[in-house]
Image: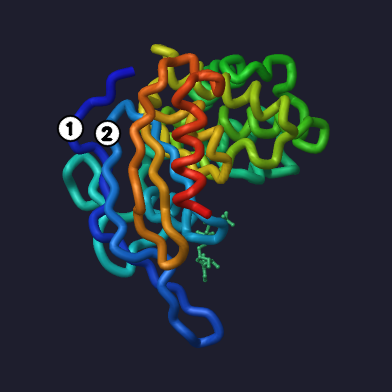
């Protein structure tokens, strides 16, 4: 997929401070980043460096202490309704069925019942959960729960999908399957979502999925390197450049 080179989403000189026990500390410092429309960007960095905080700033859930987020060339204010998040821990409501969990964002947006029913069924099918509409989260495997999380995010038809370590709570085989399915959905012409920003601590996952890997430093975090990944798709870890890129990222993080 060829990314659109026009500015789409960017962070400019973003800093974010937190306070703990009455003391301020800086989590993010001087962080600038551009994401093109259609691009799949992976963000990797040491544990606790501020990756999730960065995603929350991108979505507008928290604001930067200084600097700004620009979306389609304009400063972003408040929560960006063109974005949806997939969480590491799935974040499903246990008292709601699969169908009602997937519908949450559409209900919050005040869509009609007919539209909600149609859209929810479409995305439940897209993630392979047909037949499980009336099941509750406790009846589902981890992989199925994350499919619900994915369908819920896709159902609002976001232009940008944010994913915070989406495969970390899954067993190895399930994470490989879901990773491939996310790539298929990203490349599916029926999907409105074209742009993905994913946080991961798994270097291999970043290289198998993303167009570009953004490597963050320890706290206070900033971008230490941006690595374009031009390996042909579908990607293979057996490609001669795979190990070189993996070693390069590993040495930047460790
Ligand atoms: N609401 C908050 N209040 C105080 N400190 C916070 C808050 N949110 C995040 N932090 C701190 O900011 C730093 C970055 O946290 P964040 O969760 O963004 O890192 P991360 O890179 O996603 O971590 P991990 O690798 O463990 O997933 C941490 O030191 C964390 O304790």
Q: CA distance from mark 1 to mark 2?
A: 6 Å
What residue sits right under mark 2 in the picture? 36
x, y (%) of residue 20?
Answer: 53, 80
Q: Quadrant of residue 139?
A: top right
> Does the residue tagged 1 have its C-beta within 8 Å of any atom of ligand 1?
no
Give neighbour class at mark 1: few <14, some 14-19, many 20+ (Cα, 10 Å).
few
Q: Nearer the viewer, residue 132 or 235?
A: 235
Tell me the number on the disc at residue 6: 1
State whether residue 112 appears in this view: no
Please name whichever residue, 43 or 230, is drawn nearer the observer in this view of the structure. Answer: 230
Do residues under tags 1 and 2 come within 8 Å of each other at their CB atoms?
A: yes
Q: Earlier in the sequence, mark 1 or mark 2?
A: 1
Q: Is residue 131 visible?
A: yes
Q: Residue furthest top?
A: 189
Query: Element at badge 2?
Result: strand
**Image point (54%, 43%), residue name:** 200
Which class describes the residues within 10 Å of circle 2: few (<14), some (14-19), or many (20+)? many
Image location of residue 231, percent across then percent down = 41, 21
Q: Closest to the observer: 12 or 141? A: 12
Measured from the top left, where is residue 172 in percent x and y?
72, 31
The response on whether ligand 1 sits within 8 Å of label 2 is: no
Total count of labels: 2
Identify the residue at horizontal 48%, vertical 85% (top origin). 23
Residue at 57% x, 20% y: name it.
180
- Image quarter (top left, top right, bottom left or bottom right) of the N terminus: top left
The structure residue drawn at horizontal position 63% and vertical position 36%, both measured from the top left corner, is: 167
Q: Is residue 58 left or right of residue 184?
A: left
């Amino acid at each position: 997929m060829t990314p659109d080179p026009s500015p789409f989403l960017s962070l400019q000189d973003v800093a974010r401070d937190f306070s703990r026990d009455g003391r301020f500390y800086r989590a993010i410092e001087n962080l600038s980043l551009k994401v093109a429309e259609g691009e799949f960007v992976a963000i990797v960095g040491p544990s606790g460096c501020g990756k999730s905080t960065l995603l929350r700033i991108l979505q507008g859930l928290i604001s930067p202490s200084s600097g700004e987020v620009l979306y389609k060339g304009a400063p972003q204010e408040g929560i960006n309704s063109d974005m949806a998040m997939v969480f590491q821990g799935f974040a499903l409501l246990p008292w709601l069925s699969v169908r009602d969990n997937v519908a949450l964002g559409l209900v919050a947006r005040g869509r009609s019942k007919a539209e909600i029913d149609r859209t929810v069924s479409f995305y439940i099918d897209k993630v392979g959960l047909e037949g499980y509409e009336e099941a509750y989260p406790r009846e589902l495997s981890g992989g199925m729960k994350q499919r619900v999380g994915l369908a819920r995010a896709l159902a609002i038809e976001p232009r940008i999908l944010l994913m915070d370590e989406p495969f970390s709570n899954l067993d190895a085989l399930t994470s490989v399957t879901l990773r491939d399915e996310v790539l298929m959905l990203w490349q599916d012409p029926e999907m409105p979502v074209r742009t993905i920003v994913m946080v991961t601590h798994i270097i291999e996952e970043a290289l198998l999925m993303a167009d570009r890997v953004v490597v963050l430093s320890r706290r206070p975090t900033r971008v230490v390197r941006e690595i374009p990944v031009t390996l042909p798709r579908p990607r293979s870890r057996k490609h001669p450049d795979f190990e070189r890129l993996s070693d390069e990222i590993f040495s930047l993080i460790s």
